[in-house]
Image: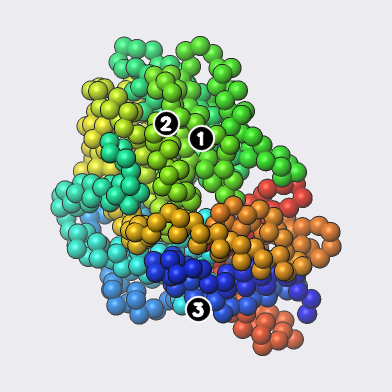
Amino acid sequence: MTMIGTRALWRAAKNRPTSVYHRVGLASSENNAFLRSERILAPSLLQTTTTTVQPYSTSVSKNCFSSCSSLCNSTIQKKDFSTAAATAKNDCEFLANAELCGYSELEGWLTQGGDDRSLILPKTGANKYHIMPKPINKDAIFRGSCTCNAPTERGYLAASELYGKEFEGKSSDVVDEKLSEIFENQRQRIASSLELPEGTEVVLCPSGSDAEYLPIVMARMLCGSSEGDEVRPMLNVVTQLKEIGAGSSVASGGLYFSTHAPLSGRLADSEGRLAGFDDIEEISIPARERNGDVIDGSKKALELAAASEDGTYTIIHGVFGGKTGLRDSVMPGSASIENSMGVIDACQGRFSMEELHSWLEQDSIVLFTASKFYQAPPFCGAVFIPKRIAERLSQVTEAPKPKEMFDSLSGFLTDKELSPCLESWKPLLKKNTSNNIGLALRWEAGLAGMEALGNTPDPERVAAVEEWAEKVTDMVQAEPALDAWCVERSIISVRLSKGDSSWRSMSELRDVYRLMSLDLSSVVPADASPEEKRSLAVCCNLGQPVDVAESHAILRIAL
């Protein structure tokens, strides 16, 4: 049987990372199938996919999540969801889908309070990234932290403990009071884990895409948009289009980016503008030319800001690690916060403490998530507000106009997720009937990973990542049909040969990405060897494909 050489995609992470990652469980200590799996995919399988394995069908092939793991059964019993913590109408679709697929209460709540990316699809029993709200089984492979994470065992147990102690069976009044305490505790622990400078404030939000709304509203405060003032026009320049989250550039223009809002559920008009988010011009700069060459987005962004009309408030983004790990050449600061703001998209979480602190020192707003490198389940975001900007925001006692902005924001945030410097927003976002329990659970899972790694010095972490990336790259390059097209820290972007001089396309890699997440041993050709059947039985989640050039797309192996 002719092979296309994707064996190295399974073999590549056989390499054992250095001991620091074993100690904290962010590497193969929790996914040790990487140390022994060899999986082979035949081109004939790709060609016959539509007839042998129906798209997104679970009737023929198994996925990598155990349906009856002792961990899940012993920690959370399956119950009628009506006995869980107080349920709002907007939670019903997420919880109902999870219940329909046989998930526990905890697992259902892990999907709540997000957007369509977290929604369990009844046809597959997983979300759109083929991920379930439970740890993968011991024989599966996970190297897709750059896209979407299943909860680690450590994170799952942390979320389970929080759920059982504070939420399970509690009334909405009790949950409302408890969530304020829990989010405050989590903000403090995030600050401690990342050694944030004194005075830095943390706002929690459902994801990195939702986080894009906050700099817009903060800018309205900083530039003096109060009642009676004209709203200043705003230019929001976003870099690395197609390598940042698909919703980030959309949200930066004040538009809805999903069919669902975390706290209001399915939207009537998912492509509409948020009320009050007017007079925003969003310009997106692509990450690459069509031949794959990197575009200097920082240079273009600064040129656009300089050319903007007088009176325009400018927000300039810098991306520190997009989908392929690409980093912009300049991380913009906020030199004059009354007229401009620098925003750093560091949502991948692949930075050193020194780098993070340098951005805060230059008054950059930093967007962060624990649901990439730190392997929290999808999704949980945060916005870091540097001390000088936090102090300035604290001095503004009136929320910015128009007030309709907060009607829109209430679909994403409540007063409980806010930090002290946004006190003027709290009365407009206070909503006892909306409690993002899922966000608290996901952050608890993420903090379990962050705190486990917290005592490891930066140099040791950097050395571990460099060693892992070097060895995995060598393994990929040793396979003739694969090419490590781009290596950026702990993300290795791999293109797959068609067997001639050309490379596989985005649509083909979507098939590979999906098929690798399934147990395909029952649908391989009859003449497949025992080794091939054994390899194809191992499920593997990688980073989703990225369209990087006209000639090819890439899949990603990410630590």
Task: Tell me the residue that label 1 is attached to.
Answer: 331
Residue 139 is marked as: 3
Counting residues from the N terminus, which is met first, the one under dot 3 or under dot 1? 3
At x 61%, y 66%, the residue is 471
Residue 362 is marked as: 2
Closest to the observer, 20 or 45: 20
Residue farthest to the right, as pictured: 500
Q: Quadrant of the N terminus?
A: bottom right
Relative to 346, residue 312 above or below: above
At x 31%, y 37%, the residue is 200
The percent position of residue 151, horizontal first and vertical second, equals 40, 64
Residue type, numbered disc 2: Gln
Label 1 element class: loop
- Whether residue 26 is visible to the viewer of this picture, yes or no, is yes
The percent position of residue 395, horizontal first and vertical second, equals 25, 23
How dense is the environment of label 3, judged by Cα within 10 Å: few (below 14), some, or many (20 and up)?
some
Q: Is residue 17 left or right of residue 397?
A: right
The percent position of residue 124, horizontal first and vertical second, equals 51, 66
Distance (Cα) linking label 3 and label 1: 41 Å
Which numbered disc, 3 or 2, marks the residue closer to the eye?
A: 2
Distance (Cα) linking label 2 and label 1: 9 Å
Label 2 element class: loop
Distance (Cα) linking label 3 and label 2: 46 Å
Relative to 200, residue 500 above or below: below
Residue type, numbered disc 3: Asp
Residue type, numbered disc 1: Met
Q: Are marks 2 and 1 in contact (CB under 8 Å)?
A: yes
Residue farthest to the bottom, as pictured: 530
